[in-house]
Amino acid sequence: KEVRKIAIQIEETRYNISSKRKTAAIDNVKKTRTALNSQADKLAASCRDKSACTETIKSMIDDLDPLEKSVKESVDYLQGSDQERAALDKAYKIQTQVSKKLTDLEEQMVPEGYVTPVPEEYSDLPQLKGRATVEMVLKKADGGPFDVEGTNYPEARMVMVIDGYAAPVTGGNFVDLVQKGFYDKMQIQRSDGFVVQTGDPDGEAEGYVGTPSKAVGKGKYGERLIPLEIFIKGDDGPFYGTTMEDEGRGGQATILPFSSYGAMGWARDEYEPDSGSSQFFWLLFDSDLTPAGKNVLDGRYPCFGYVVEGADFLRDTKEGDIIVSAKVTDGADKLVQPK
């Protein structure tokens, strides 16, 4: 519980920096520092390697002083000036460092050998037994730049962490398709201000055509389908083939909520829970419009990962933009292929 509360402060710091809510960002940093200092021993005791976590916590605390300083410096500069932008960019980079170290800390808290339980009937589908990192590069169809808050970039490069602890089947399906090169050269097919979506291949099939699961079956054109996978806090593992509301558990919290910009969700037909194949989306989260725990996605669609670097590129990702490449850069060994 303690580390999750710290995670919220660190994530809110990023959001407040990007939206120039500087006072709120400084408050987030102060709360993070207080929590890390007061709970360092308890957090480290929850780790597999206590000494490694002690060092990680110390490093995080050391990063907070320059982070707070950079945000405070931005306050003194004229709004919209190059100096303000430089100070906020520096703060953004330091916040990214702190987030990465938080990931290291949290992963140390996963018990050695832990595997999320999945029903045997889905053993003929790829499964991700842990976490994997995927890097994706996009370019504009016309060769133009990506415009992120007035800065032009020749390509969009995003890094995503795919969480097989919370979504072993969904995450496994995605990582398997990435390794197959399925998303390479594919266009973005939807960008409406709410989500950015892709995964529908050329031709009549609406997903990846491959060997289907006996339990789930195949789509109209031979698509390999996967079951809807929802993991609620407090449960021992996910449940499959039904939504949170259909289970009579509406309003409960999922392990991975759609609560951040770039949260990744698996697409499906609205009235067919087990109809997902290869289409997925990035959520363009806005806390003012979509309060966490009160959106239309949690418990209806599986969240299986987050963009941890480059999420801002989604702001200028449009229909027709092209995924140049998608590669698994870490955690490929956690993918277990069907028996």
Image (spheres, rainbow, N blue to C red):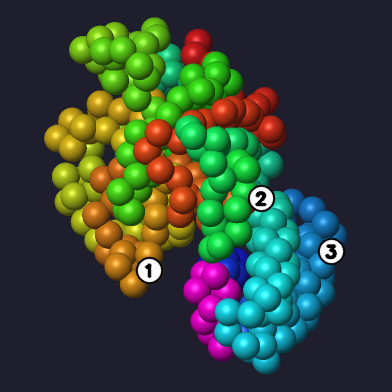
Residue 244, magenta (yes or no)? no
Residue 23, magenta (yes or no)? yes
Would you say the residues marked 2 and 3 are in contact, meaning their CB atoms lie under 8 Å apart? no
Q: What's the CA distance linking mark 2 and mark 1?
A: 26 Å
Q: Mark 1 points at which residue?
A: 287
| Circle 3: residue type | Glu
* Residue 170: quadrant of the picture: top left
Considering only order in the chain, which callout, 3 or 1, is on the residue closer to the N terminus? Answer: 3
Chief secondary structure of the magenta span?
Answer: helix
Please report the residue visible at 71 percent of the width from the left and 79 percent of the height from the top. 83
| Circle 1: residue type | Ser
| Circle 2: residue type | Glu
Would you say the residues marked 2 and 1 are in contact, meaning their CB atoms lie under 8 Å apart? no
Q: Name the residue under label 3.
A: 55
* Residue 125: quadrant of the picture: top left
Category of crowding for the residue at label 2, using alpha-carbon neighbours closer than 10 angstroms: few (below 14), some (14–19), many (at least 20): some
Q: Give the range drawn in magenta.
A: 15-24
Q: What's the CA distance linking mark 1 and mark 3?
A: 33 Å
Please report the residue visible at 27 percent of the width from the left and 64 percent of the height from the top. 294
Can residue 91 be seen here? The reply is: no
Label 2 element class: helix
Q: Position of residue 288 (x, y in %)?
A: 34, 72
Can residue 268 be seen here? The reply is: yes
Q: Position of residue 40 (x, y in %)?
A: 73, 73
Label 1 element class: loop
Q: Position of residue 332 (x, y in %)?
A: 65, 27
Question: Front-most of 24 and 175?
Answer: 24
Q: Residue 107 carries which label?
A: 2
